[in-house]
Amino acid sequence: MVRESLETLKDEFLSRIAEGASEEEVERLRIEYLGRKGKLTFLFRGFKELPPEERPELGEALNRLRQFVEDRLEFRLGELKQREKERILKAERVDITLPGSRWERGRIHPLTLVMDEIIDVFLTMGFEIARGPDIEDDYHNFEALNMPPDHPARDMQDTFFVSQDRLLRTHTSPVQIRVMEQRRPPLQIIAPGAVFRHDDDATHSPMFHQVEGFMVDSHIAFSDLKGVLTHFLRQVLRPETGVRFRPSFFPFTEPSAEIDIQCLLCEGGGSTSEGQPCRVCKGTGWLEILGAGMIDPEVFRFVGYNPDQVSGFAFGMGVERIAMLKYGIEDIRLFFQNDLRFLRQFS
Ligand SMILES: [Zn+2]
């Protein structure tokens, strides 16, 4: 009788745990069969009412059934866990043969490269670096550089004005004034930085970079200027680069010169190997690269130096122009478009 009910119980349990029982159902079955008020527990309680001779056999059967139920519940749980694991593995499957996303290697911007190179050459010659504000006042940008308000040279520098008196500096020359206002000679300074002019085409950018340089002491001559700049150009460009000085005009230097180098493409010949005029120098064989001169006595007076006691030279160059010549770049806008195909070529 009891044995029969054990068989029934087992069959019933088996059909309920049959494939499809969820984790919650397994837990429910555990309580229903093995819990404090469970069906098996109930049978165990009735056990002591049996006649003693029947107890061993039935006891064993009962224990086996309990073990059986426990094992099946455990097994079902294991099955469910395994299935869940497989589901996750399938859902989160990653194809490790797909190419990964590459980390781009950074490059130094060509303008920074050239700027660093320029600075290095001057540092080896004993120059030190000074900097000034991007937003200047009229006095430092123009007036103290010998360009009074009505001076025609102001028109050559298409100025961005911030207010009546404030402007984006049109050149790095105001740093000259700022340094000389604060210090006494001897001075040997370069001032690299951004400058701004209202101009925008293939060879002009509204923002570009200059390196200003000057040297002031008691006996600085034009030959010093010539030596320093010739050495500089041959270091940055080519050791054999031809250099020539042409008379020119700047309000803040006297005498003034423009410095040309032999064309880097046609090497001064002015034409290609096919006999066509060189497109870089337009057939002249020379390229303008720097402006320079002896600092005008008027400028010294503005900063409180005695022009009878000191002399000096100053020069200024466009970093973009040097980079364009050095690398054969024909459009200045390439520097600022951040096109990786362009930037990747420099290292
Ligand atoms: Zn040329």
Image (cartoon, rainbow, N blue to C red):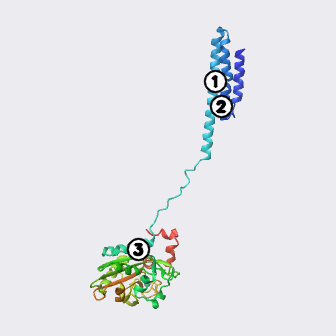
According to the picture, the residue beneath numbered tag 2 turns out to be: 27
Q: What is the three-letter code of the residue carrying label 2?
A: Glu
How many residues crowd mark 3 within 10 Å: few (<14), some (14–19), many (20+)? many
How far across and down, in percent of the image, does residue 133 sit?
43, 75
**Front residue (pair 190, 55):** 190
Q: Quadrant of residue 26?
A: top right
Residue at 29 percent across and 79 percent down: it is 186
Does residue 78 sit above or below 161 in this rendering?
above
In this rendering, the label closer to the viewer, 3 or 2: 2
The residue indicated by pointer 1 is: 68
Q: Establish if 212 lies above or below 308.
A: above
145 vs 59, left or right, is: left
| Gap in angstroms between the C-alphas marked 3 and 2 | 75 Å
Whether residue 345 sits left or right of residue 304 in the image: it is right
Q: Mark 1 is on which residue type?
A: Phe
Q: Count up the numbered dots.
A: 3
Amino acid marked by disc 3: Met
Residue 191 at what x, y percent from top left?
38, 76
- Which of the pair 166/83 is nearer the observer? 166
